[in-house]
Image (cartoon, grey):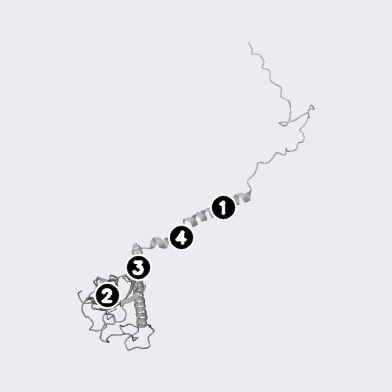
Amino acid sequence: MDPPEENGIAINFGTMEFGSGSQQPKERIKSTPLNLPKPPNEPESTRQVEEDIVPETTSKQETEATPQPTEKVLTQESEESIRIRQQQEAKRKAEAAEQKAKAEAERKERQKQEAAEQLRKEQEAKKRKLDAMMGGIGKSDGTASGSEGDDSQAGDKGSPQGNPYATSYYGDPGSGTGTGSYGLNGRALVSKGKVVQECNQDGRVVVRITVDRNGRVIKAEPGVRGTTNNAPCLLEPAKKTALMHKWNLDSNAPSQQIGYVVVNFKLGQ
């Protein structure tokens, strides 16, 4: 038995893959190409720029990788040169510190000498002032006023070989140690003391004292006329010794009466 005939599908005649309308042309029709957008083509100039950039980047990397001359010098510097430079710097600092210490020591010594000289000048000026106030034996051109003695004639009574500060107007000056002589007219000495020197020197220090009505020494000025040694280590204990003196109370005495204390120092005492 023969198989049944296969029925196919009729295909419309045409010469193109697209078309529209109901009229069937008998021959090929004329057509124009569709204006489809062209795919973007990479411009030639763009490719050229990119190719030019690649060598530039490579050159920049090579520049960055190249070490600087300064770094190369530091790398080549030896440890020996560093050690020598450190030694030189330490030596320079030590010399600067030594010069600074020397300058400071000289400055302190200079200040010390200036202070000692100033003290000496002040003491000499004070001594000259006191001597001018007291006057002197055989002088008539002094600036001091008043007189001292036990008779009616004005002047400074006493012996040229005697102690002008003693309570007695006659006799020889003492040569012993301590306060062998003193003078405060019309007043009697009640008590006294002695301060020992701290240096080993000898000499006599005359101290001008100011005494109030109660008999207290309220002021003492060592080193006035008659002093044979003006060493500071003698002047200070002489002043302290004079301040330890005490006279009798006298309500009729001047409010501030001037007198003298003589302190003798000997070697080893």
The residue indicated by pointer 2 is 234
Q: Nearer the viewer, mark 4 or mark 3?
A: 3
Q: Say what amino acid the circle numbered 1 marks.
A: Ile
Q: Earlier in the sequence, mark 1 or mark 4?
A: 1
Q: Secondary structure at mark 3?
A: helix
Q: Earlier in the sequence, mark 3 or mark 1?
A: 1
Name the spot of residue 7 as percent of width and height, x first.
68, 17
Label 4 close to label 3 by CB (< 8 Å): no
The residue indicated by pointer 4 is 68
The residue indicated by pointer 3 is 97
Whole-Å distance between the Cαs marked 4 and 3? 39 Å
In the picture, the quarter occupied by the N terminus is top right
The residue carrying pointer 3 sits among few (fewer than 14), some (14 to 19) or many (20 or more) residues within 10 Å by Cα, namely few
Q: Is residue 21 left or right of residue 84?
A: right
Name the spot of residue 92 as percent of width and height, x first.
36, 68
The residue carrying pointer 4 sits among few (fewer than 14), some (14 to 19) or many (20 or more) residues within 10 Å by Cα, namely few
Q: Earlier in the sequence, mark 1 or mark 2?
A: 1
Q: Say what amino acid the circle numbered 3 marks.
A: Ala
Quarter assignment of residue 265: bottom left
Please tell me which residue is depicted at 36% across the width and 78% down the height of the picture: 126
Q: Earlier in the sequence, mark 4 or mark 3?
A: 4
Whole-Å distance between the Cαs marked 1 and 4? 25 Å
